[in-house]
Amino acid sequence: MGGADVDSAVTVLIFLAIPVFIGLAIWSQYRRHQRLLAWAASVGWTYVGTDPSLADRWHSQPFGVGHGRRVSELMTGRFEGRSVMSFGYRYSTSSGKSESTYTFHVVSMALPAYLPNLELTPEGLGARIARTFGGQDIQFESEDFNRAWRVRAGDIKFAHDVLHPRLMERLLRGDVGFSVRIEGTDILSWTAGSPRLDDIAGRMRVMHAVIDAIPRYVWLDHGYDPGTSPPPIGRAGNMLPT
């Protein structure tokens, strides 16, 4: 077989393989969609699919950057009486002719009042680099906590009021391997990658624990009495300092 014949055979194989790969991708997406539907039904949640407004609801990472922002695999429900959502979020960035796409799994839980922004990200290379170049990292009495978490907030007093010793101890357990932020009337967590159903319950438990640990005087300072006040209409918070 000559070189031309080999090239022709390769071309034919490529053309035959393309529909196969497309079909496998469609089948895989269908199977995943069915798993999400089944999971949502099993826990009494609703599979919504998408809500474009969520891509612009929050302003700090991983939101507020890039283009082509998209929400997918959105599911809504309740946990311990609080409204919750789980969804995939992606955006793209461009540099010259190259483009990169970033995907995250976001879980959010509604707060009963509007609170200042407070963000906790696990300490790592990115946090150390940010701190080296002057990025905010609020320090607390616990050195273990300071080593484990980078904390940012627009209101430092609020950060210290919320992150009291009991909550710091809770956040030092080994089950918190994700970022957490209070923003407006939501608390949300996020990790890189596609949504993982096995992670949702654990993340909701942590966020619920954070809400329950917020002292009553903090709620009162922000116009909400946990015993009597109805929750206000939700809205996003402001940008965090770098």
Image (cartoon, rainbow, N blue to C red):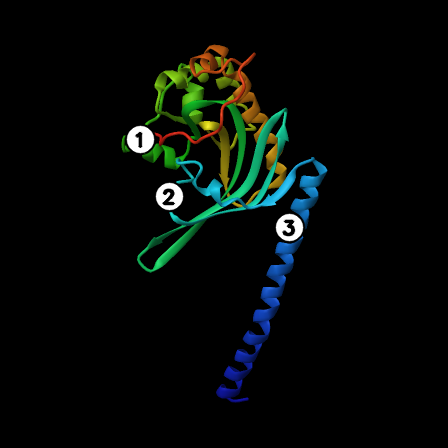
Q: Distance between the residues labelled 1 and 3?
A: 40 Å
Q: Kindly state the secondary structure of the residue where label 1 is placed.
A: loop
In the rendered image, which residue does mark 2 sit on?
65
Q: Distance between the residues labelled 3 and 2?
A: 27 Å
Q: Which residue lies furthest to the bottom in this view?
A: 2
Checking the image for residue 135, the label placed there is 1
Residue 21: image location, x then y, percent: 59, 65
User: Which quadrant is home to the C terminus?
Assistant: top left
Tell me whether the residue at label 1 lies in contact with that at label 2, contact meaning CB atoms closer than 8 angstroms. no
In the rendered image, which residue does mark 3 sit on?
33
Choose the circle earlier in sequence order: 1 or 2: 2
Checking the image for residue 216, the label placed there is none
Residue 35: image location, x then y, percent: 67, 47
Q: Which residue is drawn at 70% across and 44% down?
A: 38
Q: Which residue is drawn at 59% across and 75% down?
A: 16
Q: Which residue lies furthest to the top in this view?
A: 217
- The residue nearer to you, when weighing 36 against 176, is 36
Tell me whether the residue at label 3 lies in contact with that at label 2, contact meaning CB atoms closer than 8 angstroms. no
Amino acid type, callout 2? Val
For residue 106, above or below residue 175:
below
Q: Nearer the viewer, mark 1 or mark 2?
A: 2
Amino acid type, callout 1? Gly
Tell me whether the residue at label 1 lies in contact with that at label 3, contact meaning CB atoms closer than 8 angstroms. no
